[in-house]
Amino acid sequence: MEKIIDEQLQGSALERPERLGNTKKLFIESYGCQMNFSDSEIVASILAKEGYDTTTDLNQADLVLVNTCSIREKAEQTVRKRLETYNAIKKTNPSMKVGVLGCMAERLKSKFLEEEKIVDLVVGPDAYKDLPNLLDEVEAGREAVNVILSKDETYGDVAPVRLGGNGVTAFVSITRGCDNMCTFCVVPFTRGRERSRDPQSILEEINDLAVKGYKEVTLLGQNVDSYLWYGGGLKKDFKNASEMAQATAVDFAQLLDLVATTQPKMRFRFSTSNPQDMTRSVLHIMAKHPNICNYIHLPVQSGSTRILEAMNRQHTREEYMALIDDIRKIIPDCGISHDMIAGFPTETEEDHQDTLSLMEYVQYDFGFMFMYSERPGTMAARKMEDDVPDAIKKRRLTEIIELQQKHSALRTKNFVGKTVEVLIEKESKKDPGFWSGRTPQNTVAVFPKEHYKPGDFVMVHIEECTSATLIGKAVQMGNA
Ligand code: SAH
Ligand code: F3S
């Protein structure tokens, strides 16, 4: 059940240890997708050089930044409420500055700055390197805004400051932006064109994490399967064969192969996969490497081919099912999760039944399920009427969630009696005597702490379960 809630709306403030010499305090809060949380680590790194340490105490902050999400209307409303809170504090501490980062920056810059005057600083997802200049502008009492989207900024040269994490698992972004133009989605407008990051800088960041003791890395992108990096160049431009090998085109399957081979002691995940771009070679690379987790987040959005077409998803229901069949064949114990939208324009009861029957076919481990929310500027908003009444959207969403809970319970039950490898991440929230971690399939497992510690790979015998959590007992250390 934990995984079914709209976790995209849960903000969290991040803190890192004090750094000598830094005197100013930054309070940074992130909403939305993992990419935003990852971007906040880049922002913290850029601002550390400007003399800022992070704090989780709003009242101590010299600078408050909120990394925002525009994906659904509800996400934007949550951020607006937070801005009201910041402004209330600002009344008692007028020197405190407030800035908006991320997806809402692009959409609402003039509104924030001119009409409402509730923020001092507006910075879009590709302009974080401009933050030092923008802060100077704020200090000089001028309007500070940069929402220019870039075709090539990947922040590959910024070493993120790891914030608020568990020291065991981390995210590393490999692409930015998205070119897919799903008709409901605001991301291509707020985050711009898709670009891939230099594999060398990805490997370096992962190596740095390994040295610091991290055990699991999730490669991040709006659409990781379309990762493609061209080094280009001519043979004569390279000193030796290995330098040249690094400089030729690398696709996502090759990148996965590269990271898994380079760091055999680390576990790898990736998110998000797009059915239209996921290649069979990715599945074979997953099967080849025991340290690539057998788990795929494969959003489908609808089970109806007609709705998929209206959403500009470039595959049919049958093609998606064929991909699922291949996943099950090539990686028999693969965990699969989904994103689903209820009540896209023109969705009929029959389309909705197609969604439920597709879910029956796949039997997903878990999913993120949403009511359609019209986003200004998207193709769906421009060309289609948001014509499914709210009550019907709600009812369909409830049916989708209930079916998912049934499948999740079946899936977790399947693990009872088996022994699975769990990477310990942190103490269980419900019981301080238990560790909490995840299986390769991305299912949460808890078990008594005994002498184990975070970062250990442990073989856990599963004794019971809820629909979202496995409960067991450690039997021995794992292999990794
Ligand atoms: N490829 C991205 C998708 C980001 S949006 C990724 O990395 O996950 C995450 C999910 O939000 C989408 O898969 C979709 O299910 C949902 N979503 C996006 N736009 C939406 C909208 N307008 N209304 C409701 N849900 C939406
Ligand atoms: Fe959005 Fe579709 Fe890209 S959901 S992020 S446009 S793959």
Image: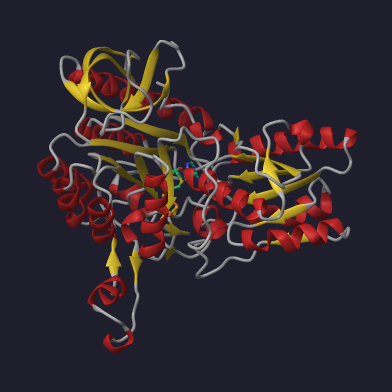
Q: Nearer the viewer, residue 124 or 128?
A: 128
The answer to whether residue 53 is above or below residue 420 is below
Which part of the image, by quadrant, shows the C terminus? Answer: top left
Compared to residue 102, the image places residue 294 above or below, namely above
- Residue 296 seen in the current view: yes
**Residue 216, horizontal then vertical, whole percent:** 35, 40
On screen, 412 above or below 70? Answer: above
Left or right: 373 in relation to 28: left
Q: Quadrant of residue 402?
A: top left
Residue at (30% x, 44% y) in the render: 268
Q: Position of residue 318 (x, y in %)?
A: 19, 48
Residue 19: image quadrant is top right
Task: Name the residue nearer the viewer: 300 or 417.
Answer: 417
Which residue occupies 58% across, 39% down?
31
- Counting from the top left corner in percent of width and height, residue 330 is at 11, 45
Render colour scheme: secondary structure
Q: The N terminus lies in which quarter of the figure?
A: top left
Q: Number of numbered discs present?
A: 0
